[in-house]
Amino acid sequence: MQNQSGYIPPFSDEKYSLPEGVMAKATIQWTVVGDYGEQKEKTVMVK
């Protein structure tokens, strides 16, 4: 589980800086399981 201070809401369009050591070009993808068991996926392309 991620700590709240560094947590990025999966469905926000908030811009954030990448952690040190992360390549500038990357694909970030994660899956969220909702309150009713549904799965949501989001992929973020970092350019």
Image (cartoon, grey):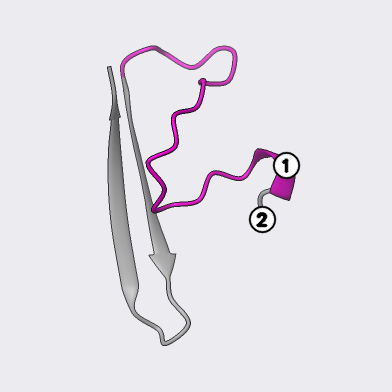
Point out the image quarter for the C terminus: top left
Real-space Cα distance between discs 2 and 1? 12 Å
SS class, disc 2:
loop
Residue 40 location (% of width, % of height): 31, 65
SS class, disc 1:
helix
When the figure is inspected, residue 39 is found, relative to residue 45, above or below; the finding is: below
**In this rendering, does residue 3 appear at all?**
no
Name the residue at 55% across, 12% down.
21
Q: Which residue is mark 2?
A: 1
Residue 23 location (% of width, % of height): 41, 13
Q: Quadrant of residue 1?
A: bottom right
Which span of residues is magenta-colored?
A: 3-25
When the figure is inspected, residue 23 is found, relative to residue 42, above or below; the finding is: above
Q: Amino acid at mark 2?
A: Met
Q: Amino acid at mark 1?
A: Ser
Marks 2 and 1: CB-CB under 8 Å?
no
**In this rendering, does residue 31 appear at all?**
yes
Name the residue at 41% across, 48% down.
12
- Inspect the magenta stretch and tell me whether residue 19 lies in it: yes
> How would you rate the neighbour count of disc 1 (Cα within 10 Å): few for under 14, some for 14-19, many for 20 or more?
few
Q: Quadrant of residue 14?
A: top left
Name the residue at 54% across, 44% down.
8
- Disc ID at residue 5: 1
Residue 39 location (% of width, % of height): 33, 72
